[in-house]
Amino acid sequence: MALLALVAILFCLGTSTNAQLSTSYYSYTCPNLSSTVQSVVQSAILQDARVGATLVRLFYHDCFVNGCDGSILLDDTSTFTGEKTAGPNKDSLTTKVFQVVDDIKTAAENACSGVVSCADIVALAAMDSVSILGGPSWDVKLGRRDSTTASFSGANSNIPGPSSSLQNLISSFNSQGLSANEMVALSGAHTIGQARCTTFRSRIYSDTNIYGSFASQLQSNCPSTSGSGDDNLSPLDVQTPTRFDNNYYKNLQKFEGLLHSDQELYNNGSTDSLVATYSSDASTFSSDFAAAMIKLGDINPLTGSLGEIRKNCRVVN
């Protein structure tokens, strides 16, 4: 009886709301999860490299709204408006990326039904995307559970926009427990992916801290008139747009940051020196980026008895 009581106590502790994330969380319940996720992500990136950048953005945008809980994946319902149609998400997170998450979830369910959360899938897919595109890998902490609601207003207010000032960026990341240094490291994710004309139009026509020929080149694909060419795309890193490296920081030093918020990291401010370090030392950038992504994944996860394991990432059970 004493042994049974001890087991019961340990079980309760293991499912409490104070449970911690662990890199070995699925070692016994879904031992092939990592390879399962990686296979789907790799296939998607081979078809469209932009998917990798969007999966990284998906993780960031999820974690900045009530923590890393998969809320960004929920479709609208009669009781709440989801986060997909919020300003920072509606045009930057494509239909394709949500389909990739669905494909991963299907593969995970086939491997170990009812075990893996959608929130953990997003975290793993982000790491795999970076690694597959040439960047660092890291041991992803797992054990998150899925939210049963979403926050449209939180998505609109918590995610800094492309016109943000350096102080806006620092404050936004600080509010999530991330330092200015971690903000600069995480911004390096802009070494992959593309942005819409409407997000950088004001920079290429109004900012003065931009290299002239770079601005002219962008203007040829992004007319000055609002509503004209708004969805035309340009790479965030014109040098190696589909490879995860440190060219993003080299571009900033040449005043060739695509977004106003990018160039704010190198504009006679407090983060100039870190941009210079990352520009000249790729290994330091890689290690700092990996560490910052791990910390990003620690933002207010639902664990233990909180939340649920969704059967379909788009809807609450």
Image: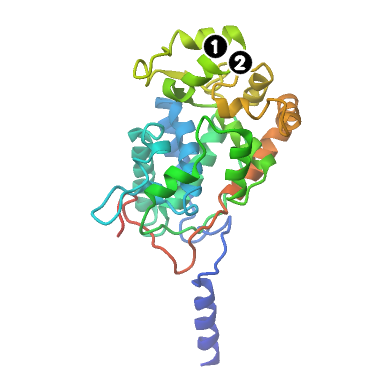
Residue indicated by mark 1: 215
Residue drawn at x 69%, y 20% is 253
Element under disc 1: helix
Count of marks placed on residues? 2
- Name the outermost residue toward the left: 78
Residue drawn at x 39%, y 62% is 308
Judge whether 228 appears above or below 191 on screen: above
Residue indicated by mark 2: 210
Whole-percent x, y for residue 298 in the image:
57, 54
Type of the residue with mark 2: Ile
Q: Quadrant of residue 256?
A: top right
264 relative to 45 in the view: left or right: right
Whole-percent x, y for residue 6 in the image:
55, 85
Residue drawn at x 54%, y 75% is 13
86 relative to 18 in the view: left or right: left
Residue 251 visible to an observer of this rendering: yes
Element under disc 2: loop
Residue 139 visible to an observer of this rendering: no
Whole-percent x, y for residue 313 in the image:
34, 50
Determine crowd level at label 1: few under 14, some 14-19, many 20+ residues with C-alpha closer than 10 A: many
Judge whether 216 appears above or below 287 on screen: above
Query: Is the Cβ of the residue at disc 1 closer than 8 Å to that at disc 2?
Result: yes
**In the rendered image, which quarter contains the C terminus?**
bottom left
Type of the residue with mark 1: Ala
Q: 55 or 30: nearer the eye?
A: 55
Q: 159 or 36: nearer the eye?
A: 159
